[in-house]
Amino acid sequence: MIRAAVLVFGAALAAQASTVQVAIVRQAGSVTIVPEGKVLIETPGAKVKPLEWKGELTLRPREGGLRMADMRLRTETRLIQADGSRIKVGSNFYRGTLILRLDPGQTVTVVEEADVEQYLEGVLPHEMDPGWPLEALKAQAVVARTFTYANMGKFRKDGFDLTADTRSQVYKGLTGVNENVRAAVRQTRGEVLGWKGKLLRVYYHACCGGATTDAGAAWGNDGDIPRPLKGVRDPWCAASPHMKWTAYFAWAELTAAISEKRMLTGALKNIRIGARDGAGYVRSFLVKSGGDTVDVKASELRGSLGAGEMKSVRIKSVNVLKKGVEFLGAGSGHGVGLCQWGARLQAEKGRAYGQILKFYFPGSELSEVDE
């Protein structure tokens, strides 16, 4: 560990607790809650008392507060779990303190306040296959932890730190957690990636298709991008099922997708690759519409068409056909930072998680958060 970096991280994160608040339900009309074991209920200005109700409870908004079973609750109420208890919210179990909150629009939000390390256990099985090699999972754990601290408070104006979906990291509490996941988190406890003594803002994706890309090019940021996020050539993910793919879209689909962001003056007649970055990722397409040629951002087109179909913007070629267009591509995801399939294959070849992280984030420092 690089202890000099630890001291800087500690100063930067001193105001942050070792807990994270994650919105597990947002602005719902109602939500089912099933407490298991000893659960305490805490409302502002009142004593903490045991939750007497058992079985399935429905949390709903009411005028001026919340209702759960026949209990009338304040606009913000906490359910505190004790003695190893857990609470099921929707289809997932959670073990942290739950904050039940009335929203201004007469909906309910449920936020879990969890220890960061426990939170990471709930992230890993939904961001990487929990059956993958331990060293790959450990690399993912470090990156996910770094992401967590770097994005802490991103949704503070909404009353929590992070969401439980892809806007932050996918999180489902205790669901999918196994010993492999626990070991990955435990064996990397507190470890994060840094650059020049500061926390590195990291990213990860499924498969880079042979090269990761510069974060600045990917997000359209011309600012100073740190060396660890400049991208690397990657031979490790060659065996990934995402290495090569083909996606076909009819002209009507493409017209609708492009029209979400760009004004078209006529029917689409052609589409071709405009600009690429140094790693081979397409940054723009040139589309012929009527008598005009329109520049379309590749990331926007992918977002409109769906990331499940157009897996990445590392497009090798475009084939214009009579009834539509065929895209031949490589990789899956935005291509910045950790390539998860590359990490898996490196781990299978015996490389340790520190080596994997150094490969994808060259020059970065593996350090510890000063908790």
Image (spheres, helix red, strand yellow):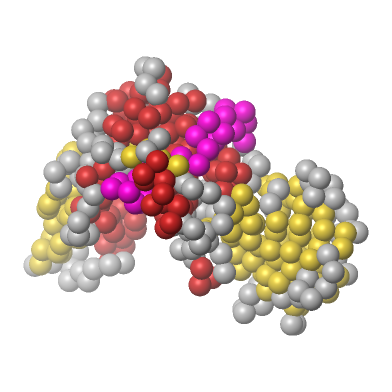
In the rendered image, the vertical position of residue 132 relative to residue 365, given as above or below: above
Q: 49 or 370: which is nearer to us?
A: 370
User: What is the quadrant of residue 158 in the picture?
Assistant: bottom right
Q: Position of residue 183 (x, y in %)?
A: 57, 29
Q: Most extreme residue toward the top, as rendered?
A: 349
Q: Most extreme residue toward the right, as rendered?
A: 52
In the rendered image, the vertical position of residue 118 relative to residue 102, given as above or below: above
Q: Position of residue 296 (x, y in %)?
A: 20, 60
Q: Is residue 269 visible?
A: no
Q: Most extreme residue toward the bottom, as rendered?
A: 64
Q: Which residues are magenta?
A: 177-201
The question of residue 199 being in magenta is answered with yes
**Residue in the picture at 19% in, 64% down:** 267
User: What is the quadrant of residue 39 in the picture?
Assistant: bottom right
Q: Position of residue 300 (x, y in %)?
A: 29, 59
**Quick check: 18 left or right of 35?**
left
Q: 229 or 312: which is nearer to us?
A: 229
Q: Is residue 234 visible?
A: yes
**Residue in the picture at 34% in, 27% down:** 355
Q: Position of residue 108 (x, y in %)?
A: 67, 69
**Residue in the picture at 47% in, 32% down:** 138
Q: 176 or 4: which is nearer to us?
A: 4
**Quick check: 364 left or right of 118?**
left
**Residue in the picture at 26% in, 45% down:** 229
The question of residue 182 being in magenta is answered with yes
